Amino acid sequence: MSTQLQDDAFIAELKRWRDVRGLSQTALAKRVGYTPSYISKVEGGTQRPSAEFATAADRELRAGGALSRAYSSLEPRTPAAHTSAPENTSGDTHSANLLVEHEDTTLHYDGHVYRATQRRRLYNDSPDPVTRYLIRISVDRYPGNPERSNQHYRHNPLTWEEINLSASIGSEPLTWRVKHDRDAFKELWLLLENENGQYPLYPGESAWLEYSYTVGDDKWGSWFQRAVRLPTQRMSVRLDFPAGLDPVVWGTETTMTAEALPFRTAIRRSDEDGRRVYSWTTDDPPLHARYRLEWKFRARTHTEETPHAMETVLSASDRMREAGIVQDGDPILTKTARLFDLPAEAEDARRVVAELVSACERAATVHVFGKGMGMAAPQVGIDRAAAIVRTPDGESITLFNPRIVEESPDSDEQYEGCLSFFDVRGKVPRPLAISVEHQDIDGTERITIFEHGLARLAAHEVDHLHGKLYRSRMREGIEPIPVAEYRGTGHSWQYGR
């Protein structure tokens, strides 16, 4: 492998993990103690990364050693007598030229293998012909657990043979050129040509570009994400699953100007010939928006390690672990979460909330939260001071940098559960009302008063952000009880009038 290709491999890993963690160059720079300019130069290929930077970036991005391994493959760069102008490797040379009139995706699952088929009607709005188009194929079997994912793909890399890629424009098959080839990430240029000729997209012309690939469910996680990288007029997605698996699907939307929210338009469901099909569409999605669909097969209770093995009865905590919730014993649950600098880190804050919303949706597929629920960033492996509280009616309240500034003198003692050790319930004394000082995404400071059940939920999540679990709040000599002995599941806490 040449030095340039090795540099490209490190750059690809750095960009990929920044994208996975939702960090801008500025946000990563602040974490690792380097300037944004340094990271920009590293990613642009004009600055060689240092060993210290690679180690720090791997740690802060929780890349499970992927960046350190990519760095170790680099060779010392020898001075060159002449350096030609580098090829633009940003992957977006066509972004200013193309409009997507319609993007339509179908994901078909047969119980063992996923096939993704993506069709885009492209319009060339530039004065020059377009001759290539960049695509990415990225998988993550264990989202939220990069060490486990990296180990999994290191021993079971995604291969070109299993992907079985096909691509065409109009009725003409296309060739391609690989740009990056990693264990869990492929990036390549679709070339608008084949052995019979060239098929450029000329100015003012439209054409359907289609590509399709397969991935086994041992390498595909239960999620699918679309990112709007080109101006797009319409986007549609179709998930096609075996009805016998009793799938349930939900979706979250994140934009540059709004927090993560459930899809603004409903996901439609239909049952057809033993298949359960979910369809969703949106018009004029904003540039850089991300749409993430997730699912769970309720009829399948296999463990993650042996997805086709004999069915296993999972504990409540195991189910939350499967849903991506960090479990008791992880050091992140006992440390104080890092505060946001708002509004400077608004983009990072939005992406963290997107992860929290997604985790709440996953948890809600395996348990009924009649009292409402909450989720703190450390519970999804993110060391940032953000939490959301959901009322029993489904209203969501977002808290950035929260702290309790006042408590009522009156309190009560009721059972609580924690998603990070969900096999038990503990009787916890809490004030009947609390005042929480927190910030909005734009940095505005406010104080919100919570009462009764919402006060209990909010206090529980604020505790998480300060490294406290509810066991530390229980009276001396009182221990949590097994969930099997608890009789309050699905019911609200009771308060006198």
Image: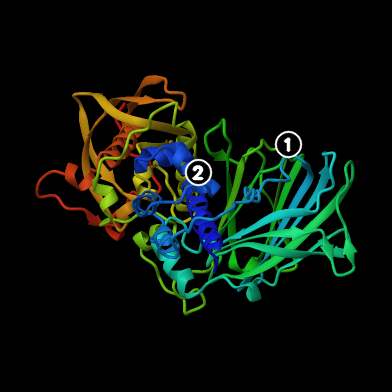
Give the vertical position of 422 relative to 253 (above or below).
below
Specify whether residue 124 is in view.
yes
At 38% from the left and 20% from the top, the residue drawn is: 445
Say whether residue 152 is left or right of residue 117.
left
Using a 10 Å C-alpha cutoff, classify the residue at mark 2 as few (fewer than 14 neighbours), some (14 to 19) or many (20 or more). Answer: few
**Name of the residue lying farthest toward the left:** 477
Quadrant location of the C terminus?
top left
Residue in front for this viewpoint, 151 or 35:
35
Say whether residue 17 is left or right of residue 250.
left
Q: Position of residue 481 (x, y in %)?
A: 23, 56
Q: Position of residue 404 (x, y in %)?
A: 26, 27
Give me the disc on residue 284.
1
Give the vertical position of 319 relative to 446 (above or below).
below
Specify whether residue 357 is in view.
no
| Residue 4 location, quadrant | bottom right
Residue bearing mark 2: 41
> What secondary structure is marked by label 2?
helix
Residue in front for this viewpoint, 173 or 370:
173
Give me the disc on residue 493.
none
Residue in front for this viewpoint, 112 or 225:
225
At 48% from the left and 69% from the top, the residue drawn is: 153
> What secondary structure is marked by label 1?
loop
Q: Position of residue 88 (x, y in %)?
A: 65, 48
At 43% from the left and 53% from the top, the residue drawn is: 367
Using a 10 Å C-alpha cutoff, classify the residue at mark 1 as few (fewer than 14 neighbours), some (14 to 19) or many (20 or more). Answer: few
Check disc 1 and give the amino acid type: Asp
Give the vertical position of 472 relative to 200 (above or below).
above
Check disc 2 and give the amino acid type: Lys
